Amino acid sequence: MIKVIWPGRTKNEELKKLISNYGQRIARLTAFELIETREAKGLSDGEAEKARSIEGEYLKRKLENDYLVCLTDRGREMTSEEFSRWLRMRLETNSRPLAFIIGGHAGLADDVLRRANELLSLSKMTLSHELARLVLLEQIYRALTQMKGWPYAK
């Protein structure tokens, strides 16, 4: 079971369509759940810590006994091939659901990061949180198709 959890709905319509498409593709290959929690609203940019804290509480409510992977710029970087091998190993050896968490525009609260079993970075470059959602789903789909032995465009 793979879960992907993030605060708020995707606002960019083009990204929303692509995210939905990849979510449907992933669900055809494995047990999959995409969870959108409430996001912190009405806070200024200067209240980023408060936003992270509020969103962190909503995110943690969706966790059970999951193997938690938080996406952060402080996380481990992998190539697509390394990620595919890592995902295969996690799915084959872990009896707990695998939950990926992507923070909102302010990132993830420290207590959520401390709860993580692993930290993952998608890139050394800064990605918007909405684009990071799409990139993660594409990489999960890519890895699952490789596990099935299906061709995937490079």
Image: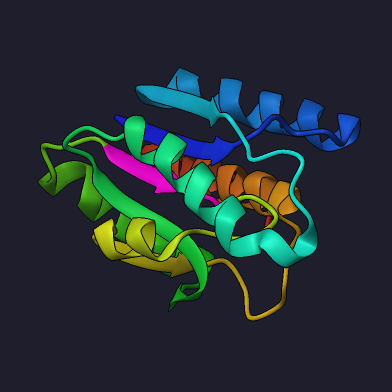
Look at 81% across and 37% down and name the residue there: 15
Residue 28 visible (yes or no): yes
Determine the residue positioned at 16% across, 37% down. Answer: 65
Whether residue 1 is situated above or below residue 92 in the rendered picture: above
Residue at the image position 69 percent from the left and 25 percent from the top: 21
Would you say 105 lies left or right of 144 here? right
> Foreground residue, 72 or 123?
72
Query: Which image quadrant for residue 116?
Result: bottom left
138, above or below 24, in the image? below
Quadrant of res 46? bottom right
Question: Where 91 falls versus 113 (above or below)?
Answer: above
Q: Position of residue 87 (x, y in %)?
A: 33, 52
Q: Is residue 89 left or right of residue 19?
A: left
On the question of residue 85 being in view, the answer is no
Residue at (47%, 21%) from the top-left corner?
27
Query: What residue range appears in magenta?
Result: 98-103
Give x and y (percent) for residue 122: 57, 66
Rendering coords of residue 128 (x, y %)? 76, 58
Magenta highlight: main SS: strand
| Spot occupied by residue 103 in the image (x, y as percentages of width and height) | 56, 52
- Left or right, residue 135 beside residue 33: right
- Magenta-span inclusion, residue 14: no
Pick whichever, 7 or 86, lies toward us: 7
